[in-house]
Image (spheres, helix red, strand yellow):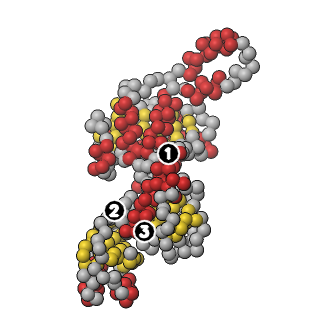
Amino acid sequence: MFKVRTYNQISPRGLDRFPRDRYEIASEFSSPDAFILRSHKLHGEPVPESVMAVARAGAGVNNIPVQEYTKQGIVVFNSPGANANAVKELIAAALLLSSRDIFGGMSYVQTLTNIRDAGEMSKLLEKEKKRFAGSELYGKTLGVVGLGAIGSMVANMALGLGMKVVGFDPAISVEAAWRLSSQVEKMENLSTLLGRSDYVTLHVPAVEATRHLINSETLRSMKEGGVLLNFAREEIVDNDALVQALDDGTLGGYTADFPTPELLGRRNVLLMPHIGASTQEAEENCAIMAADQLMDFLENGNIANAVNFPPTSMARSEGHRITISNDNVPKVLGNILAILSESNNNVIDLVNKSRDDIAYNIIDVEEAPSAATVDKIRAVEGVIRVRLL
């Protein structure tokens, strides 16, 4: 029986994926096998030795100490693309709000409570509506920074609105490239994209390489009057540089899902309360994906959409399965196979994958290895964690 500890409110549709004859689900366990969570911060919290995996029902994992967990052989899953449509639709709204003063106009209307005559109100609005005029999106250029699950959907959506779209992503995957319309013009660098775009939308993860990707230097490359949209992560934009660019007119406007005190009350800033993925459908999709990935790992050792381990999958055979995580250094797998050979455990099938400093192995053998054999494998230099499934 696997024990999964929940944090936050996880969609029941996700939790219902776990068969109750094989899984116990609760918010409190002394020795859980795995965590499933949304935004709960795990930094600084002790993690039981029993934990083998953490599944995030969402895309970002900055609330999880990934590097620390990797060293302990804990696989960290996320749910890329499950909330992509929700974010894409909010970007559509953000583009419209940024191009026309819809918010200003609606707010103005709500101030007219002292007028009781409809004719008088209509006459006043006809006079004042020019204050809220804007421009159309049609024919404007949208720059998309990051062309993954969300970015590619946003790019295709903007084309449907009649916009020209340019994109920049030096690490675009083959899968994302297939999703992307051939009408999206690929830029060689960020500066070129910023200089070409009337609107720029960010869709990159919050990692060290993207921290303050938008800073005083990159903002100088922005097209005059350009508008920046950030529905990715707060850390990607240097707020001090952003305020300066808004003050001096380098940047025409900023629309984001991450309010901070210094940005409140500004005429050219629109802020939302981190609602990018806050739809019922997105929460359900993320929970379902996280649960399915967690079950496949716990039951079969397969890994899909982990942020710290390589994607690794092997169909189950008639034998017994061993999974091993280890430092990505020479001879570890050879030493493991030698131990299995010495103990007369015939290998039926195996797969070995690596990612950066970590390697992961799935090995199927004919007979269940003895406790002594498993202990010998654990003792191999470089081995982090061994599981017998």
**Real-space CA distance between mark 2 and mark 1, rounded to the nearest whole angstrom:** 26 Å
Would you name the residue on which mark 3 appears?
298
Mark 2: few/some/many CA within 10 Å (<14, 14-19, 20+):
some
Amino acid type shown at disc 2 = Pro
x and y percent of residue 113 in the render? Answer: 72, 22
Mark 1: few/some/many CA within 10 Å (<14, 14-19, 20+):
some
x and y percent of residue 143 in the render? Answer: 38, 37
First reached walking from the N terminus: tag 1 or tag 3: 1
**Real-space CA distance between mark 2 and mark 3, rounded to the nearest whole angstrom:** 15 Å
First reached walking from the N terminus: tag 2 or tag 1: 1
Query: From the viewer's perspective, is residue 307 above or below residue 162?
Result: below
Would you name the residue on which mark 2 appears?
311
* Residue located 46% across and 54% down the image: 288
Comparing labels 2 and 1, the label whose residue is closer to the camera:
1
Query: Foreground: 84 or 63?
Result: 84
Residue 18 visible somewhere in the drawing: yes
x and y percent of residue 389 in the render? Answer: 38, 75
Quarter of the rendering containing residue 155:
top left
Query: From the viewer's perspective, is residue 116 above or below residue 314?
Result: above
Q: Is residue 379 left or right of residue 273?
A: left
Query: Foreground: 16 or 289?
Result: 16
Mark 3: few/some/many CA within 10 Å (<14, 14-19, 20+):
some
Query: Foreground: 215 or 270?
Result: 270
Would you name the residue on which mark 1 appears?
281
**Real-space CA distance between mark 1 and mark 3, rounded to the nearest whole angstrom:** 26 Å
* Residue located 52% across and 37% down the image: 255
Label 2 secondary element: loop
x and y percent of residue 274 in the render? Answer: 55, 45
Amino acid type shown at disc 1 = Glu
* Residue located 37% across and 47% down the image: 148
